[in-house]
Amino acid sequence: MPIQKIVQILFLVLLVASCLSCNNTKEKSIATENSNVNDVIEVYDFNSLEPRLYTDSNKTYLVNFWAMWCAPCVKELPYIEALAKKYPEVEVLLVSMDFPEDIDVKLKPFLRDEKITSEVVILDDPDSNTWIDKIDSNWSGAIPFTIIYNKEKRLFYERSFENLEDLETELNRTFKK
């Protein structure tokens, strides 16, 4: 084989390798840009989740129990997201009641489609008769259910919020000084 042909083949091989290398880099940077807090969704039983429902600090927390199959829950998620963006000092936790086996096939795509960036965890504990009363003895177990709290106050809402203003009113009435 003539030397010129070998040089051409080597040039083509290097060109293809270079192009493939650039594509991989681009894909990695796109994946990094699209990653968010919900790339990994933790699954809790109630004993593991319970410490996240209390605080000794002045920081305000909003914990919302919800599920993808609950229409009022899904309807209020954008209001909770808007509140989280408007009040970054409020820590938001969305506790999904969906099945753990649905995380990759249903929950993560739903969160991406709905642009949910607040932290989501799944509560997988079949003994709801016990843990519902531990959260609030007045809670029937219906969702959506929201807790807004800090070390001074703790309020429960067994209803959906109608809009951002509705949610903001409860937050401001309770925790603004």
Image (cartoon, rainbow, N blue to C red):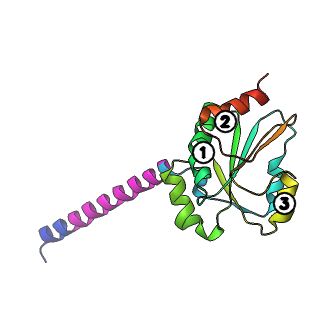
Please identify the quarter of the rendering in which residue 170 is found.
top right
Q: Position of residue 134 (x, y in %)?
A: 87, 55
The label shown at residue 131 is 3
Distance of mark 1 from mark 3, alpha carbons? 24 Å
Residue at coordinates 21% horizontally, 65% vertically from top-left? 12
User: Relative to 122, is 54 above or below?
Assistant: above
Circle 2 residue = 167
The label shown at residue 76 is 1
First of labels 1, 2 by sequence position: 1
Q: Position of residue 2 (x, y in %)?
A: 11, 74
Mark 3 vs 2: CB contact within 8 A? no
Mark 1 vs 2: CB contact within 8 A? yes
* Number of numbered discs overlaid on the protein picture: 3
Q: Nearer the viewer, residue 83 or 136?
A: 136
| Secondary structure found at label 3 | helix
Query: Magenta segment range?
Result: 10-33
Distance of mark 1 from mark 2, alpha carbons? 9 Å
Q: From this viewpoint, is residue 88 visible?
A: no
Please identify the quarter of the rendering in which residue 165 is found.
top right
User: Relative to 88, is 8 above or below?
Assistant: below
Q: Nearer the viewer, residue 174 or 26?
A: 174
Q: Position of residue 79 (x, y in %)?
A: 59, 40
